Amino acid sequence: MAVSYKEIGLVNTVDMFKKAMDGGYAVPAYNFNNMEQLQAIILACAETKSPLILQVSSGARKYANQTLLRYMAEGAVEYAKELGGEIPIALHLDHGDTFELCKSCIETGFSSVMIDGSHHPYEKNVELTAQVVEYAHKYDVTVEGELGVLAGIEDDVVAEKSTYTKPEEVEDFVGKTGVDSLAISIGTSHGANKFKPEQCTKNEDGVFVPPPLKFDILQEIENILPGFPIVLHGSSSVPMDLVNIINKYGGEIKDAVGIPEEQLRKAASSAVCKINIDSDGRLAMTAAIRETLAEQPSVFDPRKYLGPAREALKELYKHKIINVLGSENKG
Ligand code: G3H
Ligand code: 13P
Ligand code: ZN
């Protein structure tokens, strides 16, 4: 049965991005696919009064079940109210790859969709994105497009090398498609291994320092599209303390490198209105679960290891809101 996001109490991203642009901060876009992640996200955003974009990939939608997800989103809105935080919440499809998937999400309560045509030739990307925008806007659903390719895994598509967004294409793309926001490639990438060790230098503690983001490209895009909301994918910082806990308790995560927080802070104060974070949440949860199971081998009640994992996740999300994105008290 079709349902509009408006009936569920969700919002699209128009107002969120306008306020983020004017206020010089970015809205967190946190991925989820299970209850503990959703609880942690809602708790973090309600406690900090931050606006929120709840993000679901096509893989997450398959994992969680689309019907259950629709009610989880509705539950999230009610839960935030119960916590005393009347915060704006959008439900967003992350890396939608077909018109049919975007349409199906719109019919099941999503208030925003991404159509990621970045792996297609330019003209095909324009055509596909415009088709989604035409449909979505009939229902007041906002649409994110993407220009430029991020290295790493993007929803089952693996790109070995990134291709930076070409500033000379953005005006034509936004004009022809009518997208509400644009994801760009300026050196971020998906996953916990964003750069190869040989691309990095090492600091005095022996920690990899990645090459800086291409702020010159971001600035050029801002100059061409003043006031237009820009999105950064692949923005996990991959905290070394979490990687070290995972590895200490039997994990094997090698050569992990993320985006330094100060660079994300700088991006958030510019035209970047949405910052996508998934991998850091995965690391926080895995570190807490591994630690509990290793330290307390007799535990077999999932609440005993998922509970601490949920708490660790909440703290991570709050830290990002307060210290990196600047969205605290902006809800
Ligand atoms: O950008 C990709 C997101 O981290 C979602 O990943 O497709 O494994 O759910 P996933
Ligand atoms: P990370 O892998 O850096 O968390 O990026 C997530 C993302 O871009 C989701 O679309
Ligand atoms: Zn992404």
Image (cartoon, rainbow, N blue to C red):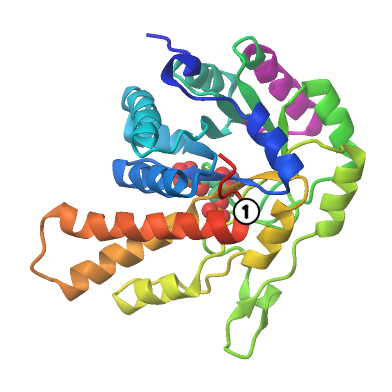
Q: Is residue 117 left or right of residue 288?
A: right
Up/down of 148 relative to 64, above or below = below
The residue indicated by pointer 1 is 326
- Give the main secondary structure, helix, strand or loop, of the magenta stretch: helix
- Position of the C terminus, as image quadrant, is top right
Q: Residue at x 58, y 61 (%)?
A: 323
- Residue flagged by tag 1: what amino acid is it? Gly
- Is residue 147 at all visible to an observer of this figure? no
Q: Quadrant of residue 284?
A: bottom left
Is 127 a magenta residue?
Answer: yes
Please give the range of residues in magenta: 115-135
- Is residue 288 at all visible to an observer of this figure? yes
Q: Is mark 1 within 8 Å of ligand 2?
A: no
How far across and how far down the image is residue 266, in percent? 73, 59
Q: Is residue 191 left or right of residue 122?
A: left
Up/down of 50 relative to 103, above or below = below
Q: Is residue 309 left or right of residue 128?
A: left
Q: Quadrant of residue 16?
A: top right
- Residue positioned most to the left: 298
